[in-house]
Amino acid sequence: MVIDELENNVILQSVFNASFEGIIVIDIDGIIHKVNQAIETMFGHKTNKLLEKSIEILIPDTLKLKNEYSYTANTLELKEKCFGKDFDVFGVKHDGTKFPIEINLNSLNIDGKQMLILFIIDISKNILEKYNITKQKLVTKEAQYKAILDTLPDLMILYDSDGNYLEIHTPKKNKLVTAYDEHIGKNIDTLLPKKVCHKLRKAFSNCQKTKETQFVEYSLLINGELKHLESRIVQTDSGDYLSIIRDITKSKNAEKIIKESEEQKRLALEVGEFGSWDWNLITNRIERDTYQSYLLGLKEHEKVITFESFLEKIYPEDRENVKLVVTEAIKNKKNYTIEYRILHPDKSVHWLHEKGSLFTTIDGIPERIIGVTNDISERKKAEQKLIESEKQLRKLTVQLEEKVAERTTELTSTVQKLVESNLSLGDQIQITQSAESKTLSSRILLSNIAQNFPRGFVVVVDANFKIVFIEGEELDDLGFRDIVQIGDTIGNVKIVPQEVSTKVKSHIEKTLKGEHCSFEVEFQDKTYMVNTTPLINIDKKIEEILLVYNNISYQKDIELEILNTLKKEQELSELKSRFISMASHEFRTPLSAILSSAILIEKLNAPGYEDRRLNYVSKIRASVKNLVVILNDFLSLSKLQEGKVVAEPVSFDFIEFSNSLIEEIEGIKKNGQTITLRHPQPNIEVFLDQKFLKHIVFNLLSNAIKYSEEHKEIIFHIETHKQRLLFEITDQGVGIPEEDQTNLFKRFFRATNTTHIEGTGLGLNIVKSYIELMGGTITLKSDLNIGTTFYVELPLKNEIK
């Protein structure tokens, strides 16, 4: 066994030293424990100089290796790992030179320690060989691509994303060739028209978004000749854009010639009053032009697309003959000519002359019939008259031969008929002149309607918002007659506010899409209802928009008046409801007290109950007094509404007046309540209605008492400022909710937090009315559960009007 191990160690040492691959043994910390001669030669180090050194001095970028051997340090086995095949690992020689290496990594266990063995190959020669092979392939590919490009007839240009010319390939025989080589490095904005640049940049953007080929058509003047070009644009892998440009001038000119030819044919048919049609015999579908449909009496949206539906339009007596002639023509593969009658929706009969040319497939199968039709009704009428005239002539000839003796009488009869015919012709001329007169009158009437359009005006604008017609009675009232001219653009009329023009333009845009619009605009204190309608040309395209402006200011005023009346009715109804609710409550309480007190007095009629009877009598008096107050409020309200109340001012001292009122109101104060009168001036002489002021102050003080608790102070402050009397009454009561403050002076209104306290809701309304009658104002400030202050401002002297 020992001999075998020695032999194996000798063999391994020989392999280790003789290996052309570099071999390094390192521990898990990257410290070199053994290297072979190939490593020392490869990295340019002397023998044994690398031992106990860090692997970093040979392979600086060992992060990947560290990850691998750090991860596998505690594992018994490590699968083979390879680095550097993609030239991403480099070694550093002793002289500092870097060179690419490939590393194979394996794990091994030496004396119970986990070690890593690195097999390293210098791959510099491999890279050079791969480079030469790749270069040769590239040259071959370039030759192939150049050969392909030389065979292509199209011009090819490579642009970068900014529109700069990178490469240009121009075929030798391409007529689009100019000095394109001079364009390289330049931008399309400096060489091409603005519209063409816009199309190309849009195609670049679409290429990037959709990754699909974009097709762009545009025209350029090249060498003095207008060229129509088609550009197919694709995005390359590098983000550039390859444009393959083809000359489509011939096809475009051919399309133009075809369109012009078709237009000339259509005009020729219209001038000759011919209608054309194309019948596909395979699909049994007939395509007709507009005049052909007119000849058949078809309505605008009515379709007659099959032969069977066409036969239904033919006069019943001619139907079978038409069917037979057409069927025979198809059967015999021949053209045909036929005359037949058509029955129009208005029951009128029209004669039509039709020619049909039959076309067959290559196999001789009838494929289609193309034909023209014209109206021969007048000719048929003339022929019918001619036939009738011939019959009449034959009849006259026979009569002349048979009755020579009666020739004179017959001639007279003939002359008479001619006279009648002349009279009939005169009648027809008169009818024609009458019709012409009616047409002229209609035109004048239409012109007058437009010019005198009542309470409005009519405008016609084109798709560019330009005014092509404007007339109406309202133009003079608005001042448009001399300002707005044909050709002006909507939005540039200075007299019209910008917001109105913007609104009108937005609805014109909708109408150009086929939508009928109705909307309102306001300017110059007038309201107009605008209705828009698209005007369709003979090609059924919307070219112009009709706008009809109607002045609805009067209707708007009526509408506002109706709304105000309805609001007043609603308020009246609400007031009635409040009055009924309040009256039923406020009258019931004192009446109930009076009734109960009267009953108790009746029962306590015996001697010894005098004090209790007096107490009940006092309650009756108080209830009656409360009823009197309520009735006085109703009476005051009624007089105020009827306008019977006027101020009767007199001169008096307001301070003395206020003191007397405070004494008078002492009897209704709650326990512990006090009224403090504050006035910086000893007396204030006023010229006001004394009764009004008594009601105002009494009501405000009684409210302060009513809505305040016991032992609270009420402050009555009086002062003057600039010939105005100012006084405030402040309490410390329940306060008024903020949402109720705006309605507090309305009739029958009571704050939501006082419904349990007696009151009519009229007091403050009457107070405000009295104050206003004397030229004053009243305001308030209130906080819930803190208190309320009423501010009254009056003139010192109320002038009698």
Image (cartoon, rainbow, N blue to C red):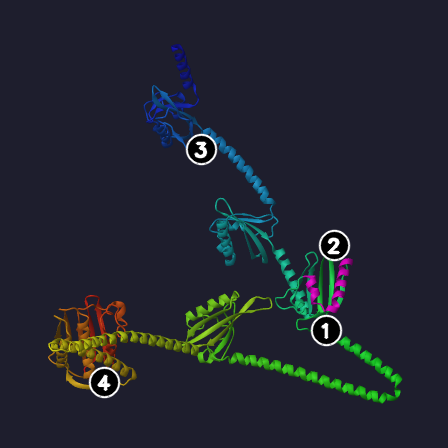
Residue carrying label 4: 647
Q: Quadrant of residue 251?
A: bottom right
- Between 212 and 94, the one nearer to me in the picture: 212
Residue 524 makes an appearance in the image: no
Task: Report whether 400 appears left or right of 217.
Answer: right
Mark closest to the chain's N terminus, 2 or 3: 3
Q: Are marks 1 and 3 in contact (CB under 8 Å)?
A: no
Q: Residues within 10 Å of mark 4 (few under 14, many from 20)?
A: some
Task: Report whether 266 appears left or right of 534.
Answer: right
- Between 593 and 489, the one nearer to me in the picture: 593
Q: Main secondary structure of the magenta part?
A: helix
Task: Report whether 228 appears left or right of 413.
Answer: left
Q: Is residue 673 magenta?
A: no
Q: Is residue 324 magenta?
A: yes
Mark closest to the chain's N terminus, 4 or 2: 2
Q: Position of residue 161 (x, y in %)?
A: 47, 49
- Residue 281 vs 97, above or below: the answer is below
- How far apart are the alpha carbons under marks 3 and 4? 110 Å
Residue carrying label 2: 365
Give, as a three-letter code, the residue at label 4. Ala
Q: Which dot marks residue 377?
A: 1
Q: Name the element at disc 1.
A: helix
Give, as a three-letter code, the residue at label 1. Ser
- How far apart are the alpha carbons under marks 4 and 2? 111 Å
Residue carrying label 3: 86
- How far apart are the alpha carbons under marks 1 and 2? 35 Å
Mark closest to the chain's N terminus, 1 or 2: 2
